[in-house]
Amino acid sequence: MSSAPNVRRPVTINNQADTVGIILTTFNDRPLLETMVPSLVASMPDRYQYAILAVDAGSTDGTIEYLQSQGIRSYGPHLPAHVWDWPTGYLSQALNSSIKLYLYYDEDTQKFRAKGYVGYLAWVHADMVFHEQGWLGKLVDILKADPTIGKLGPDNHDAPALPPEQRLRAGNQCPWIMPVDALMALWEKDGMFFDEQFVHCGGYEDWDLNRRLIGLGRKVLIANDVRITHQGMGSRTQEHAETRGYHDAGRINAGLYQNKWGDGKPPC
């Protein structure tokens, strides 16, 4: 069986720090991944390097085998690096573990630093399809043009087109991409990336991180003229069924967010 490489040499590259480290969180997602992964690899921009790292929650449907056949390095409870496990593990933990695999901890300064080749980290879901060639490179270009942006996502394929002056608007969207320096700024201020008080799969940990970014003077934006297809919740269905605690987790997370910020509103 032929394997699609998870790192591709660009035609030209001016700075190794332009490399994007892509995080993929999975759990029994093989049917979705068989569409998502080829579309992701085919859509990557030639002018930037990238790497894909998957953090799996203990899949039993062949997810790991499929990822490995595509040349994607995977971590999980059945693999040497155990970083996420349902139902005791949470998405916030999985994301933090993934981020730390791309960074290193400097014992002298007691701060996280980027490994030399990674300038940006992005998170993608199994329930996405990437039709637009170079969508990720377009987001990197926007981040490079405006260093005050802390987190940026594309719009969904069916979102209405906005006038050029509204190309960028405040909002929270997945997939997202963040400059590594924004993540390191969060660590230096708060001693964490995503807050691991927020439990299970999704809900409020992203709003919390966005509020903390905005508090640092960084913007959280959506690029209306960059498009992907996100089915929404597709990759969570199995996780919810397995944990049977999602609705309780939603109430727990809502309470934590309310107590922390004084309201239940998204920051953007």
Image (cartoon, rainbow, N blue to C red):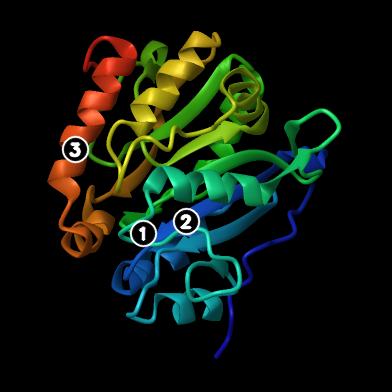
User: Can you tell which mark lies on residue 126?
Assistant: 1
- Up the image or down, 121 lies above or below 190; here it is below
Label 2 packing within 10 angstroms: few (<14), some (14-19), many (20+): many
Query: Mark 3, mark 2: which one is toward the viewer?
Result: 3
Q: For this view, does 119 lie left or right of residue 34? A: right
> Residue at point 27% right, 9% down?
262
> Within 10 angstroms of label 3, few (less than 14), some, or many (20 or more) residues?
some
Give the residue at x 63% y 71%. Answer: 5
Helix or strand or loop: what does disc 2 sit on? strand
Which element carries disc 3, helix, strand or loop?
A: helix
Residue pointed to by mark 2: 24
Q: Residue furthest bottom?
A: 1
* Residue 58 vertical position relative to residue 118 in the rendered view, above or below: below
Asked whether the beta carbons under mark 1 and mark 2 sit within 8 Å of each other, the answer is yes
| Amino acid tagged 2 | Leu
Which of the pair 167/1 is nearer the observer? 1
Q: Which residue is mark 3?
A: 250
Q: CA distance from mark 1 to mark 2?
A: 7 Å
Figure quadrant of the C terminus: top left
User: Residue at position x 82%, y 38% from top?
Assistant: 15
Q: Nearer the viewer, mark 3 or mark 1?
A: 3
In percent of width and height, residue 169 lies at 37, 17
Please identify the quadrant where the N terminus is shown: bottom right
Q: Counting residues from the N terminus, which is met first, the one under dot 3 or under dot 2? A: 2
Judged left or right of residue 241, residue 21 is right
Examine the rendered structure and indicate whether residue 219 appears above or below residue 158.
above
Mark sitting earlier along the chain (3/1): 1
The amino acid type of the residue labelled 3 equals Gly
Whether residues under marks 3 and 2 lie with C-beta atoms below 8 angstroms apart, the answer is no
Left or right of 103, for residue 166: left
